[in-house]
Image (cartoon, helix red, strand yellow):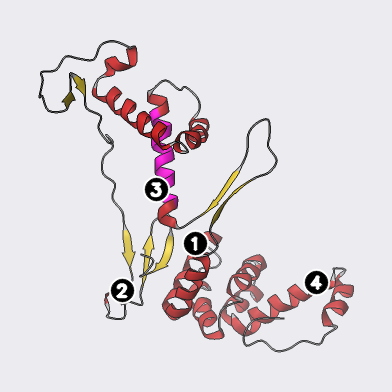
Amino acid sequence: MGGDGTPEVAEFAPAELGAELQMSPHAAGRLIGDALDLRHRLPKLWGRILAGEVKPWIGRKTVEATRHLSREVTAAVDARISPWAHSLSWGRLEAIMEAAEIQVDPEGAAVAAEGASKAQGVWLKQSDDHGIKDIYIRTEAPNDIWFDASIERIADGLKALGDASDRDVRRGRAIGVLAQPQRALDLFDQAAALIADPAVSRGDEPSAAQPGEPGTTAGRPAARSDSRPPATLYVHLDQNSFTRDSSGMARFEGVGPVTIDQA
């Protein structure tokens, strides 16, 4: 019932334990599997749970996240997270586990990444709520980041052009703008022209400009692509990233640990 390296269990053990603990055989089977994984695959974490230093739910979630891993990789995870399991949030512990998996088994991590890349898609919820629908998107991190940035930029453009709605509402409306590429481009041009000449927002004639003056076209300010400052991307690289086999690991803020190929 546990992962790689755990002993076998008698067929009717879950039903007997479930009767004693007043739970279903399925729930009892999960409990047995988690206990076996902790004792045989995550002994350091198991010891801290027995000592009352780490909450049991942390151990069970760790088991769930590592059951598909080999015993060797799980041992590396155990060594990495057991000293911090009492003080770090689950999200940070999960990032440490992912990093350990990449470092100890880069080939397995690459296969897992390839499998995850095939589980992408966009799903629309069937039911609606007074004309409002939900969209679920699963995509690669770069697409996600570009999408979020575009939504934010459109929301800012709507505000500059007079939309007084809350930011979240404007981000929701930005989906409709982004779904029509020409409309999005027009909005970018209008917002950029407004920044170049605030008179445009009042419906006044734009400031006069001499023909051929830089930044103008036929007396109108030329649209600028974006007035925001450049962004800085911080990439944290493992020392193994600089070896010939490039089997190291990288971390991107907001993305977490990834393989070098993904980076």
Dot 1 falls on a residue whose secondary structure is helix
Dot 2 falls on a residue whose secondary structure is helix
Looking at marks 1 and 2 on the same chain, the residue that comes earlier in the sequence is marked by 1
Q: Dominant secondary structure of the magenta stretch?
A: helix
Q: Is residue 69 in view from this perspective?
A: yes
Instruction: Compute the Cα span from label 3 to label 4.
Output: 43 Å
Query: Hey, which quadrant is residue 53 in on the image?
Result: bottom right
Residue drawn at (59%, 77%) of the image:
68
Q: Are marks 3 and 2 in contact (CB under 8 Å)?
A: no
Q: Residues within 10 Å of mark 1 (few under 14, many from 20)?
A: some
Q: Quadrant of the C terminus?
A: bottom left
Q: Residues within 10 Å of mark 2 (few under 14, many from 20)?
A: some
Looking at marks 3 and 4 on the same chain, the residue that comes earlier in the sequence is marked by 4
Instruction: Compute the Cα span from label 4 to label 2.
Output: 44 Å
Please give the residue where the numbered disc 1 appears in the rendered image: 92
Q: Nearer the viewer, mark 4 or mark 1?
A: 4
Q: Amino acid at mark 4?
A: His
In-image side of 259 versus 193 (left or right)? right
The x, y position of residue 108, in whole percent, is 48, 78
Q: Residues within 10 Å of mark 3 (few under 14, many from 20)?
A: few
The x, y position of residue 30, in whole percent, is 74, 73
Q: Nearer the viewer, mark 3 or mark 4?
A: 3
Q: Amino acid at mark 2?
A: Ser
Q: Is residue 155 magenta?
A: yes
Q: Are marks 1 and 3 in contact (CB under 8 Å)?
A: no
Q: Is residue 97 in view from this perspective?
A: no
What is the number of the mark on residue 162? none
Dot 4 falls on a residue whose secondary structure is helix
User: Which range of residues does the magenta coloring cover?
Assistant: 144-157
Please give the residue where the numbered disc 2 appears in the rendered image: 241
In-image side of 23 versus 7 (left or right)? right
